[in-house]
Image (cartoon, rainbow, N blue to C red):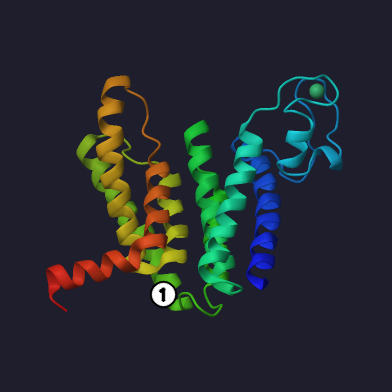
Amino acid sequence: MVSWLIWGYAAVVGACVGSFLNVCIHRLPEGESVVRPRSRCPECGAQIGWRDNVPVISYLLLRGRCRGCGIRIPAQYPVVELVTALVWVAAAVRYGWAWQALTVAVFFTLLLGIALTDAKSYLIPDEFSLGGLALGLLLSPLPGGLTLLQSVTGAMTGFGILFLTALLGEWWLGEPAMGGGDIKMMAMVGAFLGPVGAVLTIFMGALVGTLVFLPLSLRTERLVPFGIFLALGAAATEAWGDLLVAWYRTNFLGV
Ligand SMILES: [Zn+2]
C-alpha cells in the first residue's frame, strides 16, 4: 500500500518535471528564459491557463488541440511528460523512498533533456550540462549514492577524457572533432556516476555511436549528435554499470 503511494507521488512529480522539461527543451536552445513569459499557443497567441497545462491529462481532454484556435499540439509534449513520469516511477520502484531515488530521477531527467535538445538543435544547453554538474555535486553527499570526492573525481574524469579526445581529434583531423557541449556534459555525467561510471559511459556511448551512427552519417553526411549516445551510455551505466563491472572482474581479472 505504502509503495503504491510512493509510486503515485513519483508519477505526479515526474509528470510536472516533464512539463517543465518541455519548456526547457524548447526555450534553452533559443537562449530564452524558461520562467517568463508564460506559455502561449504559437498559432493564436492565447495564454495557456493552468487547467490546460496539467501534464498529459490536459492534452487528452483537449484531444491534442489548442482551446483557442484548434491547432494541433505536438505529441512531443505529452510524450515527454509521460516518459519523465515513468523515469521517476522507475527510480522510486528501484530505490523506494530514498534520497538515491531523487538523485537518479534528476539524473535521468537531465539525460532526457540533453538527448532531445541534441537531436533537435545539435546543441547541449549549459543549463543541462553545467547546471546538472552543480546538481550532481550538490546531491552526492546525500546517503546511498557517491561520496562528494567520488563525484568530484568523476566530473574531472569525464571532462578530462573527452577534453583530451577532442584535442587529439582536432590535431588528427585538422578540424574540431567534438563539441564543447559533449565535454561539459561528461563533467555532469561523471558527477552523478563517479570515475568508473564516467569511463563506462564514454566506452558504451562511443561503441553504440560508432555501430549505429557511423554507417548512417557516412551516407547522409549529417553531424553526429554524440550527446544522444553519451546519454544512452550514461543511462545504461546507471542501470547496469555495477553488474558490468562485476562481470568484467570475474571474467577478465579473476577477482
Ligand atoms: Zn491556439
Q: Position of residue 78 (x, y in %)?
A: 66, 38
38 lies left or right of 12: right
246 lies left or right of 182: left
Q: Which of 238 and 137 lies nearest the eye of the viewer?
A: 238
Amino acid type assigned to the residue bearing label 1 in the image: Gln
246 lies left or right of 156: left
* Residue 195 occupies quadrant: bottom left
Q: Residue furthest front?
A: 1
Instruction: Kindly tell me whether mark 1's CB lies below 8 Å from ligand 1.
Output: no
Above or below for 190 versus 204: below
Q: How many marks?
A: 1
Above or below for 186 versus 55: below
Q: Image point 34% across, 64% down: which residue? A: 241
* Residue 221 occupies quadrant: top left
* Residue 89 occupies quadrant: bottom right
Q: Image point 72% across, 28% down: which residue? A: 64
Q: Image point 45% across, 45% down: which residue? A: 181
Kindly tell me whether residue 203 is visible in this rendering: yes
Q: Please name the residue that numbered disc 1 is placed on.
A: 150
